[in-house]
Amino acid sequence: MSATNPVIRFTDVSKTFRRADGKGEFIAVDRLSFEIAKGEIVAVLGKTGCGKSTMFNIVAGLLDPSSGEARVVGHDPFREFDFFRGKIGIVFQNDRLMPWRSALDNVMLGLQILNKDPKQAEDTARRWLERLGLSGHEHDYPHALSGGMRQRVSIARAFAVDPEILLCDEPFSALDEMTARDLRAEFVRLVRQNNKTAVFITHQIGEAMDIGDRVLVFHRPARIAYEGRLNADTSEAARAGMREEVMRVLALDRTAE
Amino acid sequence: MMNTRPMRVLQATAGLILLAVVWQILSMTLQPFLFPPVPEIFKRTFEILFTGELLMDVLITGARIFGGLLGAFLLGCMLALVIARSRLVENFLTPVLTFFQGIPALSWVVFAIIWFHGTEFRILFIMVMTTLPAFTFQILDAIRSMSKDLFEMTMSFRPSRWTLFRFLIVPTIVPGILTAWKVNLGNAARVVVVAELVGATGGVGYQLLRQQQLFDMAGAMAWTLQLVLFVLVVQQTINAIERWALRYRPVSERAM
């Protein structure tokens, strides 16, 4: 798929790591190419160890590709460190809240790093906590919050800096199904309302299909083994068919885990 | 109920009262110059506290402890930061610091006398050298215990080095710093007396040496108590700072 002015573009990106024992290397990402358009939500599915997180870290600028070209809004996310300040928001698998900061202060973290006016930063953080149903918990420390509430705080933290791109690495996998379902719906609503581009990593087929406009299935080393599109008009039968196909493709990857 | 704060204070006080009672019994059965009566020790202790000139000796020792600890802390922070950043520096410095750790305080006293002039500098040198390795290793441990998850999360906002230091590194190492101060305070209080025994013309160590020359056990005990009281007051102050700085922790983690 070729998007006009893609927000994220990978061209033959590969990433190799040296093995822990120092003997040789292994390939985590193998000549991966894809494009993601503005406003699109792309769900990336794959078995554990298939290289999803490596791809994620390259987009986030936390890793440099060994070869190929990764571009985010036309720039190199690894080398142009300062350019991406405030442009990428990340929701991690675990909430990663700073235990010494209250919920409000955690949401304010990114805004403080971006040197926003303190009063405006506080107002923004309070607004996001309110939108995520956490009014009254502003001054609670993370240990006093439930898992779902903590993950809401981390979502608020990611949205508060108003990033162009949201990266989510299995953000709801540690939560119970009911909480995860509510947060998923909330997340999609916020992404759509705020016209964000999102990459959502998951290993749950249902979650990928609930969230994504597009579903990419990765095989190890990270390369696209399947690509499917979804929208509000996709019929139940088509969804069921796609689900079957995704399961079949996932089952073919026997190298992961 | 048995572990409430008032109960713990009561138990701790009871232990000290028992010690005083045993001492008093010994003073009644043995020569008073060996075990002077408890009231005499207290009288001498209060004398020191309320006599400006004598109290000055306590304050001088306190200042030397603080000076030495502050010097070792600042140097230890710098060394720990450098070691944390470079495996090469770690390979060079760790054996040196471990070697220093094995040198007795008394040896540092001898070295200081041979190498330097000036009492205050000698004492500062001894204090810094005896507490530096512990400070460095404890702060290094604190830096290394920094969560990789929190580091990645903070880096995702692309902070400057200073912002990263302020928002992540400092709060991460604060508990380690407070523990290091508490541990090293006791060590420093013991070392400062040894350092003051040699050449100092003031301070608790100097006064203890005088009491030994006068064969005055009550005086020796009174001056020892000054140092113990000083350490207790500073420990409590650090504990109060710790309670405030680590107020975010759940109660169970704060060690009842």
Image (tube, coloured by chain):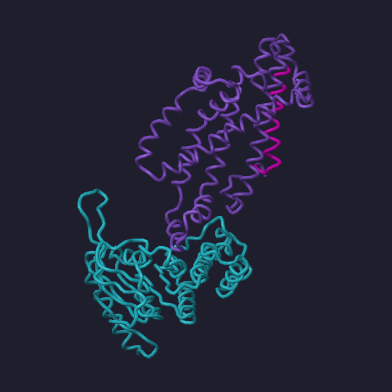
Chain colours: A cyan, B purple
For this view, does A230 lie left or right of residue A122? left
Q: Is residue A123 above or below residue B213?
A: below
Where residue A232 appears, as percent x and y from the top left, is 40, 88
Q: Residue at x 31, y 64 (%)?
A: A48
- Magenta stretch: helix, strand or loop mostly: helix
Determine which quarter of the picture holds residue A43: bottom left
Determine which quarter of the picture holds residue A236: bottom left
Where residue A58 appears, as percent x and y from the top left, is 33, 65
Q: Which residue is nearer to you in this view: B39 or A88?
A: A88
The C terminus of chain B: image quadrant: top right
Q: Residue at x 35, y 63 (%)?
A: A78
Residue furthest toward the left? Answer: A24
Where residue A238 appears, as percent x and y from the top left, is 31, 87
Q: Is residue A184 magenta?
A: no
Q: Is residue B52 above or below residue B8?
A: above
The N terminus of chain B: image quadrant: top right
